[in-house]
Image: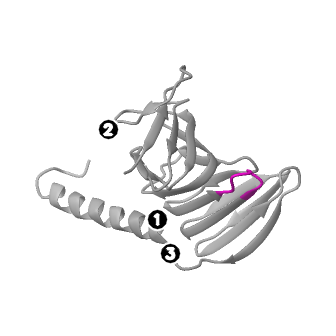
């Protein structure tokens, strides 16, 4: 929705993102003001909010290593098989998604503050030589780059991006239920 730009790996020019274009390691996306994007990587769906810089650092059958330089990202992990790893990197931390669930990461424009919100699931944030577990229904504000401080709180009220993401999850569930009438889930 809105204006979404893509810089394919190996190039240095941005172009308009196209619906259903496959992405790979090194591809970068930018969602402009009042824009959103959704990426499906099989075991997870990634949703980008307005003014968000995103890229894939590593993407293969076992690993989805994503980077957010600024903006807001919601990742809904449907399943996480043994040996699979989903990770979100920001300028000040690495967040390992340890269970299926819904995770939100907000990165300040300056890159020195990251807010991690876990609706469902468990994650482990590492940065500044320390590790910080984040459990379901927690929000943690991480500040600093060399030394990382963590301020834990509970989740706040959902905003319009959360509501859009939840609506997309419901639509996906309804489509899956209809499809299962005709095709086996596998």
Residue at position x 58%, y 67% in the image: 118
Q: Is residue 42 above or below residue 76?
A: above
Specify whether 1 is left or right of 66: left
Q: Residue 38 in the image: state x and y as whole percent.
A: 40, 50
In this rendering, the label closer to the viewer, 2 or 1: 1
- Secondary structure beneath disc 3? loop
The x and y percentages for residue 24 are 47, 30
Spatial CA distance of label 3 from label 1 is: 8 Å
* Residue 20 quadrant: top left
Instruction: Give the x, y percent position of residue 97.
Output: 59, 55
Specify whether 162 is left or right of 68. left
The foreground one among 39 and 159 is 159
Residue 161 is tagged as: 1
Query: Start and end of the magenta stretch?
Result: 107-113
The foreground one among 183 and 23 is: 23
Q: Classify mark 2: helix, strand or loop.
A: loop
Circles 3 and 1, Cβ within 8 Å, touching? The answer is no
Ranked by sequence position, the earlier of labels 2 and 3 is 2
Farthest top residue in view: 10
Asked if the residue under mark 1 is in contact with the one under mark 2, i.e. CB atoms within 8 Å, the reply is no
Residue farthest front in this picture:
33
Q: Mark 3 packing: few (<14 Cα in 10 Å), some, or many (20+)? A: few
Say which residue label 3 marks: 158
Residue at the image position 59 percent from the left and 57 percent from the top: 98
Q: Which residue appears at 52% of the width and 24% of the height?
A: 13
Relative placement, left or right, of 14 versus 156 is left
Crowd around label 1: few <14 · some 14–19 · many ≥20 (10 Å):
some
Q: Is residue 141 magenta?
A: no
* Magenta stretch prevailing secondary structure: loop
Residue receiving disc 2: 20
Q: Earlier in the sequence, mark 2 or mark 1?
A: 2
């Amino acid at each position: 929705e809105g204006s979404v730009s893509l810089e394919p790996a190996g190039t240095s020019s941005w172009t308009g993102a196209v619906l259903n274009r496959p992405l790979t390691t090194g591809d970068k996306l930018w969602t402009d003001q009042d824009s959103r994007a959704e990426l499906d990587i099989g075991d997870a769906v990634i949703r980008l909010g307005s003014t968000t810089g995103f890229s894939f650092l590593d993407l293969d059958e076992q690993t989805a290593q994503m980077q957010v330089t600024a903006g807001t990202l919601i990742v809904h992990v449907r399943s996480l098989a043994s040996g699979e790893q989903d990770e979100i990197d920001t300028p000040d931390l690495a967040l390992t998604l340890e269970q299926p669930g819904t995770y939100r990461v907000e990165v300040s424009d300056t890159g020195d503050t990251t807010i991690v919100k876990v609706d469902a699931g468990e994650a482990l944030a590492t940065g500044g030589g320390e590790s910080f577990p984040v459990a379901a229904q927690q929000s943690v504000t991480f500040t600093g780059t060399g030394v990382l401080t963590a301020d834990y709180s509970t989740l706040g009220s959902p905003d319009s991006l959360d509501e859009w993401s939840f609506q997309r999850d419901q639509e996906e569930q309804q489509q899956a239920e209809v499809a299962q009438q005709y095709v086996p889930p596998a």
